[in-house]
Image: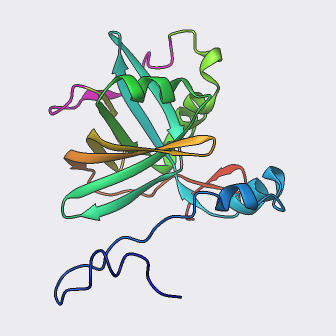
Amino acid sequence: MDDPLAAIEPAVPGRRPPLRLIDEEAPARATEVSPETFRSAMARLAGAVTLVTARHEGADVGMTATAFLPVSAEPPLVLVSVGRPARMHRVLRATSYWGVSLLARHQRDLAANFARPSADDDGTRFDGLPLLRGPHTGVSLVDGALARFECRTYRMVDAGDHILIVGAVLGVDLASGGEPLLYFERDYRTLS
């Protein structure tokens, strides 16, 4: 099949090829995969456990997320996927600055606490936590996390029942070592 964009923007040596058109009807046609089957299949994908944080209306807000990944090293960009029902969805639409703490294996209870629905939040989730304020954004970050990222929203993409938020990384702080906390088959795991 001929490339429909080739006539508009021909390939030039040393230049990236043009972006392809996206078939916006493709997700609607994928109805033979039930949400339950899809979730069961994705549960077999091990993911790092993170705490995504932001400040909204003077209060800290946080949620556990495993859908976090690097997008680009130059410039440094990361992506987090947030479900539409989550309070964090509304918060990240309202603020530009947020943080991500890559949790260590000993932070399982912290991850479980922030994985609860926000309706269960009585305002005490952050009480007693070992937190630091990010020097670039002022958001709460977890002391003892393997890595901490401070981000500014770069792009938001609507994607089904989630929103994908791409963040420009403003700062990174690395721990001296440790093992990650993982999520696999609907449970927290460690490497060993």
* Residue 2, placed above or below residue 39: below
Give the x, y percent position of residue 172: 22, 48
Indicate left or right for 91 with 31 as reference.
left
Q: Nearer the viewer, residue 22 or 183?
A: 22
| Residue in the picture at 58% in, 57% down | 24
**Prevailing SS of the magenta stretch:** loop
Give the x, y percent position of residue 99: 33, 36
| Residue in the picture at 61% in, 34% down | 112
Q: Can residue 143 be spotted in the picture?
A: no
Direction front: furthest residue: 7
Question: How many marks are shown on the rendered structure?
Answer: 0
Residue 170, image quadrant:
top left
| Residue in the picture at 75% in, 61% down | 30
Task: Give the colour scheme of this rendering.
Answer: rainbow
Q: Can residue 170 be spotted in the picture?
A: yes
Q: Nearer the viewer, residue 35 or 122?
A: 35
The span picked out in magenta is 124-138
* Residue 13, placed above or below residue 142: below
| Residue in the picture at 76% in, 58% down | 38
Give the x, y percent position of residue 136: 15, 33
Residue 34, image quadrant:
bottom right
